[in-house]
Image: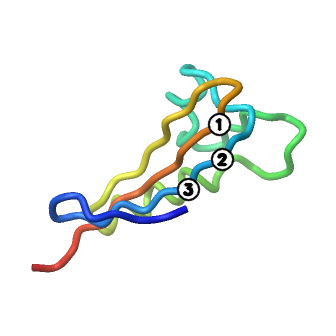
Amino acid sequence: MGYEVTGKFLRFYVRDTGSGISEEGQKKVFDRFVKLDAFVKGTGLGLSICQAIAKQFGGDIGVTSELGKGSEFWFTIPTED
């Protein structure tokens, strides 16, 4: 995990070396009530709530992933001048 300054934003990220997420899964992972793994507990609301918070702060959120290699989830928030 870490952060970096990109223009007028702070970009926070966390990377893993897990099973990864398919391209189709990446497109819907931030939707409400989406669970990509039926064996994991939860309602599928966590990432959609995170997305709402990031947007409320004027930032963004996203994921890049490759099956079998892992994922990187990130979000940005604007910095003050």
Please give the residue where the numbered disc 3 appears in the rendered image: 14
Above or below, 53 against 16 in this view is below
Amino acid at dot 1: Gly
Please name whichever residue, 80 or 38, is drawn nearer the observer in this view of the structure.
80
- Considering the image in quadrants, where does the C terminus appear? bottom left
Query: Residue 33 at x, y = what percent?
Result: 66, 42
Amino acid at dot 2: Asp
Q: What residue lies at 62% left-to-right and 22% top-to-bottom?
A: 22
Q: What residue lies at 66% left-to-right and 24% top-to-bottom?
A: 67
Q: Evaluate if marks 3 and 2 touch, with contact meaning CB atoms under 8 Å apart.
A: yes
Amino acid at dot 3: Val
Q: Evaluate if marks 1 and 2 touch, with contact meaning CB atoms under 8 Å apart.
A: yes
What is the basis of the colouring in this image? rainbow
State how far apart marks 1 and 2 are (Cα): 5 Å
Please give the residue where the numbered disc 2 appears in the rendered image: 16
Q: Residue furthest left?
A: 81
- Considering the image in quadrants, where does the N terminus appear? bottom right
Label ID, residue 33? none
Above or below, 78 against 6 in this view is below
State how far apart marks 3 and 2 are (Cα): 7 Å
State how far apart marks 1 and 3 are (Cα): 11 Å
Query: Residue 64 at x, y = what percent?
Result: 49, 36
Q: What residue lies at 56% left-to-right and 20% top-to-bottom?
A: 24
- Quarter holding residue 25: top right
